Image (cartoon, rainbow, N blue to C red):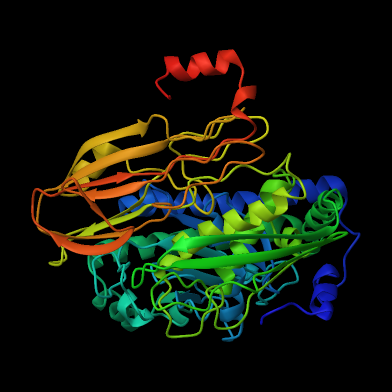
Amino acid sequence: MTRDSDEDKADRRSGGSESEVTDAVDAVTLEILRNQLEGIAEEMGQVLIRGAYSPNIKERQDCSTAVFDADGRMIAQAEHIPVHLGAMPEAVEAVRQRDPEPGDVWALNDPFAGGTHLPDITLVSPLSPETADGVGDGPDCGDEIVGYAVSRAHHADVGGSTPGSMPAGAREIYEEGLRIPGVRIVRDGELVEDVFSLLLANVRTPDERRADVRAQLAAHDRAEERLGDLFEQWGRTVLEAFDAIIDYSRDRIEAELETVPDGVYAARDVLEGDGVADDDIPIEVTVTVDGTDLDVDFTGTAKQVAGNLNAPLAVAKSAVYFVVRCLTDPEIPPNQGCYDPVSVSAPSGSLLNPEPPAAVVGGNVETSQRVTDVVFAALAEAVPERAPAGGQGTMNNLIIGSRTDEFTYYETIGGGGGATAATDGIDGAQVGMTNTLNTPVEVLEAEYPLTVERYALRPGTGGEGEHRGGLGLDRALTVDCDASVSLLTERRRTRPRGIDGGEDGATGENRIDGDPVAAKTTVDVDAGTTVTIRTPGGGGHGPPADRDSEAREADRRDGKR
């Protein structure tokens, strides 16, 4: 079992065993620097999205960017993908163990060495003021590493047995694509062509991959430039601000956790088979609240499975951190300080802490959603007024690609959000561990040999309640050439839960040419085949009888019932 020690917690809370919390940064300077650092992370994301070639990144924005300090602590992040961001520290730590130097950029995707699943390629670059143009040696920093720029992007194909690198029936990670354990892709500011060529030789659509990786590299160049500007302006006050920013967020998150009643809270839910077998797979959690400490223990969760729903512990941590942020104050600046009071553990060899060569591609996208659901359910016992009803609980992964390397289309499809004590659930939105956009119909049809036949809300799919659950979506695509179709979906037989008397949301369904297909499947199809995804609705909150007449009339008027 992996668990943080009391010494680890103490070190984190003091900013690390070799650093001390500083009082040298006044409140005004702290706020200015915090916003400037967050601006660097946001600008990295903008450069990546604008420079990418694939619709998955430039349209859906399936990517994340962040800035870390030299000790591997997250300082600032762009508001991108929850499942990416909470797991990034593992990637930074993996690179820090490899003796990085300024001028390097390291690439990795190995889920057992800092990654999450293989399509998510992470780049990590050490930052030093000396390497930024126009800064010279920097203010008293020389060539020391003062931080790291990090980007993570979902690449639409990284090789493996099927187009899109997300085979539903994979039994080991080797079927899922090229595994990158952490290699220099840039050395001394120069692209390592041999490494880049090796990567491109093992993927479909290599031109698209080349452009997307270069967009990530451009984002890192921008981070290096902007951090150099910051050191030129502020000098070593920037380093003092790193500690102060983390302390500020930790203090605020601890104040929020103190309002959660002490106690032990538990919940259980299941995944609907792993693509190899159809048996339910239990996920169990026990959450212990003790003052400002939150201990989340997944003992009781299933052992790792034959299929691809295994999830590295970093993914489980991401889900837990996301829930904590949702149930506290979302205005608290997101950084390492938000995570310090939270410990997460799962037995080694379990679904949430698997051992190689376990298949994991579905763990990042589907298991993460169920972890979110069970942690929300457990903490709903403690703070029912803050916890939402169950959202759709799936990313509805749809992958369509050509086995002749012509194209690879990947999309996660939105559904119903869970209602809260104050609002209806959001209709047709990404929920939980992803907040990507959809691929616009115009872009989808221009970029791929696909035709959108239908894209609409599903009336009546949100759970009834004082506040209604969000509606699912109905999306139908016709494939205009022979292709491979992979589906990784959930909530096809278990309904998103209602809360506090609210009713459950509706399940989703998958069809190919009108015939129902399994929640997790990979199949080759002929040109002219239509693939239909109907996504789940969200659960309701509060007794349906308490819904006011105006809201009921609006439901009828808008066709939502």
The image quarter containing residue 503 is top right
Q: Is residue 15 visible?
A: yes
Q: What residue is at 86 percent from the left and 57 percent from the top?
A: 262
Q: What residue is at 49 percent from the left and 70 percent from the top?
A: 116
Q: What residue is at 63 percent from the left and 75 percent from the top?
A: 346
Give the quarter of the figure containing the C terminus: top left
Image spot of residue 110 (x, y percent): 45, 78
Vertical arrangement, residue 210 with respect to residue 249, above or below:
below
Vertical arrangement, residue 167 with respect to residue 33, above or below:
below
Q: What residue is at 83 percent from the left and 75 percent from the top?
A: 11
The image quarter containing residue 384 is top right
Between 280 and 414, the one lying in front of the other is: 280
Image spot of residue 14 (x, y percent): 86, 70
Between 239 and 98, the one lying in front of the other is: 98
Q: Is residue 35 visible?
A: no
Give the quarter of the figure containing the N terminus: bottom right
Between 316 and 505, the one lying in front of the other is: 505
Q: Is residue 91 left or right of residue 357?
A: right
Between 479 and 28, the one lying in front of the other is: 479
Vertical arrangement, residue 172 with respect to residue 451, above or below:
below
Image spot of residue 187 (x, y percent): 46, 80
How many numbered marks, from 0 up?
0
The image quarter containing residue 16 is bottom right
Vertical arrangement, residue 241 with respect to residue 39, above or below:
below
